[in-house]
Amino acid sequence: MTCRDLQPFLSTYVDGEFDAAERARMDAHLEGCPACAALVRAEAAFLAALGRAADVPVAAPAGLRHRVLAGLDAEDRAARRPPGVRTWLTVAAALVGVLLGGSLLWGRTGPSPRQRYVESAALNHARGLPLEISRVAPENVEAWFGGKLDHRVAVPRLQRASLAGARLLHVQDRPAAYLRYDAQPRPDAAPRDVGLFVFDDHHGEVPAAPYPAVEVARSRGYNVAVWRDGELVYELVTDLDEPELRELLPSAPAGAPPVRPASYTP
């Protein structure tokens, strides 16, 4: 692992979203890289400060920013600070205003629970991690997941797409099956990677409508389709546009569940 591999995922590492093997690789790099270790500490401190600010129950008094800047002007005149120092103090004052005055707004307008799961799926798909099982029949993939997760994994048959393989990943803090497909929405188009995350949500904490009411959100340059089948939530991630994405979605006879085991026979 290199600094370039680690640095785009500092917040993911600090949030503990990697599995044990991937985190061990990152830990090994951090032990020998003081620069990345310092970045991790800074990221952890920033996220902790942001979390504390979000818990402040009231907004800062009106006029706080004006009074802070007026005070800085007075100190500048008294101490004749160089312009560069004033610049940093102005930034600090602005941050104070954001953390205090914006804390209540953050609580109201921060990412929704569903959007956090959407962003986590998009980020993990973008990482392009190697598959742990590949180029085997869907029923073999379903069997491979047996005992690795607390829920059964039924591999959906996507339209105009073939299963490339699978691995274990996380969506937020939830262990998930990750299925990768090679999709070709049009005969003249090059194959495209499509990722599908399947994770348990038996408490119904993740807002997701039962199939076929698929909702599509946007994150990190990807479209993410979200739906539910019983206690399982599915997130399909692709850079295809929304109409092409919807053409990939699994079909099922009326009244039948959208996702059935690969071994199912009518």
Image (cartoon, helix red, strand yellow):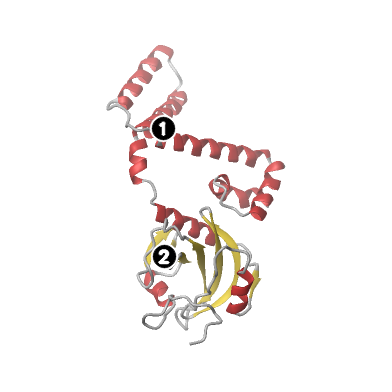
Between 170 and 65, the residue placed more toward the observer is 170
Residue 107 x, y percent position in the rendering: 36, 41
What's the CA distance linking mark 1 and mark 2?
35 Å
Amino acid type for the residue under numbered disc 2: Val
* Position of residue 145 measured from the top left corner of the image (x, y, whole percent): 61, 69
> Which label sits on residue 260?
none
Can you say whether 46 is above or below 160 in the image? above
Disc 2 crowd, CA 10 A, few/some/many (<14, 14-19, 20+)? many
Quadrant in the rendering for residue 162: bottom right
Q: In this rendering, is residue 79 above or below 241?
A: above
Quadrant position of residue 136: bottom right
Q: Which residue is mark 2?
A: 226
Q: Is residue 235 left or right of residue 105?
A: right
Q: Which residue is nearer to you in this view: 218 or 118?
A: 118
In this view of the protein, can residue 220 be seen by the observer? no
Determine if residue 181 is in view.
Answer: yes
Residue assigned mark 1: 95
Q: For the residue marked with disc 1, what is the amino acid?
A: Leu
Name the one closer to the observer, 155 or 76. Answer: 155
